[in-house]
Image: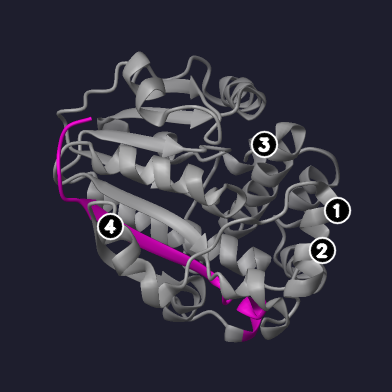
Amino acid sequence: METGTRASLTAEYMALFRALESSRPAGSRLFYDPFAPLFLSGWRKWISKIARFDAGRQLVERILDRESPGARAAGIARTKWIDDAVTGALETSTQLVLLGAGFDTRAYRLLAAQRVITFELDQSETSLAKQAALRTKIGSLPEQVHFVTVDFNKQSVSDALTGAGFDKAQPTCFLWEGVTNYLSAEAVDEVLRQISATASGSVLLFTYVDRRVLEQPDQFFGAQKLLSRLRSYGEPWTFGLYPEEIEQYLAARALRLKQDLSVAEVWQRAGRPATEMRGYQFYRLASASVVGSGF
């Protein structure tokens, strides 16, 4: 969600994974995203239609899992965990901030999110494509959702939010999904420090990759191929954290770690086959609370 047109494609693949999961029978799916198909184009739109039939969905899942081991399962697991975590955080937060929103649809499909003000931060290409797609489905966009253009490597999150009407005195749920692994260490540090300066009690939900996948990719099935593919796209992964050090890392930035787990744990807790996650065990989910106050 960081660089030009590839940003839209990255977000589109996540939308595809959500569309596939949403095509499952109500009793077996982990979440339901009726907006996901809106963001699909080309062959991805075509196979999402095939997936409406059980046999078609199973075929599509097998093909995707063979080409990119673990990616689909990881995308679905992280969506499930974040949906639940956002719903919980919004019991006390009055604002939702999506950092690198992509084609995230939580502001439109989660009841808890519909009761608060949402700020969607992203690059203009992806944001404009998203807004156009949503209008075809729901007409006018909700007044409580504010779209804010930002480049995390170059711009201040606090400045972007302040200019959009963000209330720094209100407890907020910040969501940073699928972004940190594309940034510099300095950019991640800067954003975390800006979040830690918001209202005490605010919550940060974010994803990151185990730094070992960048340093020793041969330890993870399919990682060498994955990283090579990302480099060929011109958007290599550049940042990761060691899980055993994340609590101290966050504490140094006035954030208190609440939870840290792998997408594999979420997947298996949902009763899904561990084999479908093979290849993405390095992808992780974390939550933290803001200790201090004041932007």
Q: Nearer the viewer, residue 56 or 268?
A: 268
Judging by the rendered image, the residue that carries numbered circle 3 is 39
Please tell me whether mark 4 sits on a helix, a strand or a loop. Answer: loop
* Mark 3 and mark 1: Cα distance apart in space: 24 Å
**Cα distance between the residues tagged 4 and 2:** 33 Å
Is residue 51 magenta-colored?
A: no
Secondary structure category for the residue under label 3? helix
- On the image, the x and y values in percent for residue 138 come to 52, 23
**Does residue 270 lie above or below 235 as drawn?**
below
Secondary structure category for the residue under label 1 = helix
The residue indicated by pointer 2 is 228
- In terms of image quadrants, where is residue 107? top left
Magenta highlight range = 275-295
Q: Quadrant of the C terminus?
A: top left
Circles 4 and 2: CB atoms closer than 8 Å: no
**In front: label 3 or label 2:** 2
Q: Residue at x 24, y 49 (%)?
A: 89
Distance from the alpha carbon under mark 4 to that under mark 1: 35 Å
Task: Kindly report the distance in space between the C-alpha atoms of the residues bearing marks 1 and 2.
Answer: 6 Å
Residue drawn at (85%, 46%) of the image: 43
Question: Which of pointers 3 and 2 lies earlier in the amino acid sequence?
Answer: 3
Decide if residue 280 is in sight here: no
Q: Which mark is residue 232?
A: 1
In the image, is residue 234 above or below residue 244? above
